[in-house]
Image: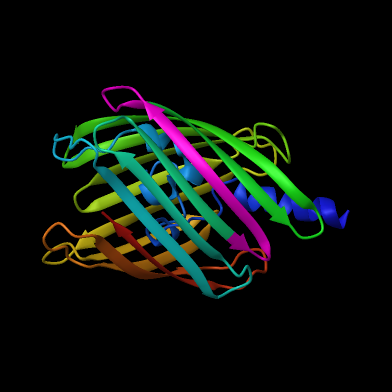
Amino acid sequence: MKVALMVATLVALLGSMALAQDIETTMAGRAQIGAGLLSEAWLQNPAALGLGAPMNGIARDGSWRSSIAGQFEVEGDVELRTISWGGQPLDGQWGVGAGWVDVIGMEDVGLGVGFGTPDGRLALGVNYQATDTPGAGDLDIFDVAVAARSFDLGGGLTQGILGVVVRDVTEEGTTTWDVGVGVESAEWRAALDVEDVTDEGETVVQVGAAHRFGAQREWQVGAGLDDGDLTAGVVYHAPTMNGGAAWKLGVAFIAGGDGDSDAWVVGAGADW
């Protein structure tokens, strides 16, 4: 019974949207499927890796767009540590990502890939996760996903993303269907995810928004609700010079639910 509970806990944590890898989505309700952040796409929505890498309409042969992010829980119950990377060639509609998550002594290492249509509006993706659970051995988890993107939505919105992810298709634990939608502008990002829409376990709603401001939009604040629990935070984006990497540093608060303690998470990342 104890081993079965640990396996179920791990699959629920890692095989769902419960754990964000990027501080931007952690503070904004941990809604990630529709947020479309490259840094965490390998796990949260691998199809987003295939939506392409628009760069002012210019494709540079041999060049890549990359994003890396990591987090560390400084106070809380789950001892969360993560690091993730995603990359896309600027002359192709595909991408790849990888990452590592350590939570309450359970480790997850994985890889995701996504392939899209030439116009960058529709993509398919798959990921693989190798998990190590103390007392329960190794698990192999596969997710498959589809994502669609719309450009120039009007009203200042530059794009919208819709994603559907089927978690744990080989039923190591429980197969669930997760759906997310997000919209983005130069200053705003908002996303809504519904985890386990078929209610195989427990349906969870995650919603949040983030706003960038400042002379160079270097500051970003975000807030949201993760299954009814408050999340909030602030991120500083260092202004880039001479085309260098854009790095960020932030902190997020996650209110505890069901008897869990509140948590504080610090995160950092870079895009280049």
Q: Quadrant of residue 120?
A: top left
User: What colour scheme does the image use?
Assistant: rainbow
Instruction: Identify the residue shown where x is 15% and y is 66%.
Output: 214
> 173 above or below 108?
above
In the figure, 101 relative to 15: above or below?
A: below
Query: Does residue 101 appear left or right of residue 121 in this picture?
Result: right
Query: Of 24 and 240, which appears nearest the observer?
Result: 240
**Residue at the (42%, 52%) spot, across then down:** 85
Q: Main secondary structure of the magenta part?
A: strand
Q: Which residues are magenta?
A: 102-122
| Residue that sits furthest to the front in the current view | 62
Residue 182 pos. (x, y %): 36, 41
Up the image or down, 228 lies above or below 159; here it is below
Quick check: is 105 in the magenta stretch? yes
Any magenta on residue 266?
Answer: no
Residue nearer the viewer, 47 or 99? 99
Say if residue 37 shows up in the picture. Answer: no
For the point 64% across and 69% down, the residue is 260
**Residue 200, how many percent across, how many down?**
69, 37
Occupied quadrant, residue 50: top left
Q: Residue furthest bottom?
A: 75
Task: Locate residue 78 relative to residue 153 in the image: left or right.
Answer: right
- Residue lying at the far top in this picture: please name it: 118
Residue 131 position, x and y percent, is 67, 51
Image quadrant where one finds the C terminus: bottom left
Q: Residue at x 22, y 68 (%)?
A: 238
Q: Is residue 174 among the parts visible in the rendering? A: yes
Question: Residue 55: x percent and y percent?
Answer: 18, 40
Q: Is residue 54 left or right of residue 242?
A: right
